[in-house]
Image: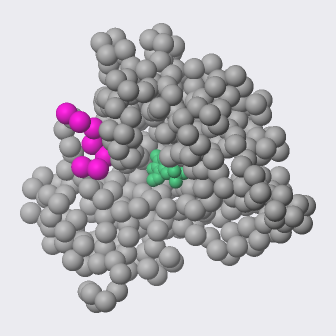
Amino acid sequence: MDSSQPPIVMSRNHPPMVSHVFDQEYRLAQDRVLSEMPPSAIIGAHRWTGTERDRIGGARFTARRLGYTPEPGRVVVTNGTQSGLLMLFAGLVGRGGVLVTENLTYPPLHTFARHFGFRILGAPIDQFGLVPDGLREIAKTEKPNALYSVATFQNPTTAIMPVDRRREIAEIAREYNFSIIEDDIYSLLLPDAPPPLSALAPEISWYVLGTAKSIAAGMKVAYVVAPSGDAAERRFWPGVRGTHWMSAPISAAVMTALIENGGDARIISAVAEEVRERQNLAQELFSGIDFTTKPEALHVWFELPDGMARDDLAARARQKGLLIGTSDEFATEGKPVPEAVRMGIGNPKNREELTDALDRFMASYEEARP
Ligand SMILES: Cc1ncc(COP(=O)(O)O)c(C=O)c1O
């Protein structure tokens, strides 16, 4: 590899940038925002939980997944999913509390747990995501405050939970009286995705639908749908726990304009289309090796054959100028760490770079074979 070149980063899970659609849609939406109001009126004040118009937009955006349009008072506009989650973990779990997650989960959760002083308990998963019996066992003995789940395109396994299992999980949460914090960030790329857990138990669910994986990683807007308008106000009232969840006004306003003119759907379908193309390209190359993914998933999960070590594979890839993630980042405490790696396919800037990256991965894989 040419060591003067920066590595290709496939340890991250960004959506592909579909500039041929995104640039035009973003400009159109931004022009509309700036033509309706002078910049000083937009930027001159905080937007708190979003303006009424932003919340109506958020209700429309989340309706496509929830299957109904939530009352806008239940919707909070946040500065991306992580910001919304921070407020929810602080308010619903808190110091000394217990959060259950899939036993391989979104890595920043470990940082949040240290920060807020709560425990994370990993529940068993299979190819369909969280296993209800395992969750029930934990619920009986540990009295969790909340469940955090990514039920569609689970990170890192790409599992999609079938609807019957979603119903069962919603029932367990009701029976054992804990909140559901659902991160549905990948779901918009999947046409006809099963309904969110939150649609099956709205009275105990906090539904989070971010734009970072379906529109653009730097959009910095995610919508939280609370169980009720009162609950939304209590958790996100500006005086509650600092004010870090708030979206930058221009991003919130542009996102609202995109929702109002249908630009959001046009960008999402272009991203999904590009992901499908990239998946086709990748899967052709992966013949003969074990991997798990889905046509619209942003990443691929590789459980390695006996004798192949994840660290060795990642190190060999790094030597060839390619960064991939290992299972250690996703593992929850006390649970076995599978011999596996994750590779995001959205980050390379075009298909040529993707092909180059995939070739480097395959060469590293062949070298790492026992
Ligand atoms: C499950 C999950 N949630 C949230 C995020 C990040 O969302 P945001 O950038 O909106 O904070 C990621 C990014 O990798 C993710 O995998």
Determine which quarter of the picture holds residue 31.
bottom right
**Residue 145 vertical position relative to residue 276 in the rendered view, above or below:** above
Instruction: Name the quadrant of the N terminus.
Output: bottom left
Q: Position of residue 35 (x, y in %)?
A: 89, 66
User: Residue at 51% of width from left, 28% of height from top?
Assistant: 91
| Residue 126 shows in the view | no
Q: Is residue 196 above or below residue 244?
A: above
The percent coordinates of residue 209 (x first, y second) are 60, 43
Relative to 129, say whether 178 is above or below: above
Task: Answer with the quarter of the image where residue 66 lies.
Answer: top right
Q: Residue 280 at what x, y percent from top left?
A: 47, 66
Front in this rendered view, residue 129 or 140: 140
In the depicted structure, whether residue 326 falls above or below residue 161: below
Q: Residue at x 44, y 65 (%)?
A: 345
Quadrant where the C terminus is found in the figure: bottom left
Q: Main secondary structure of the magenta part?
A: loop
Q: Residue 329: within the magenta?
A: yes
Q: Which residues fall within the magenta stretch?
A: 328-334
Please state the total of marks drawn on the protein image.
0
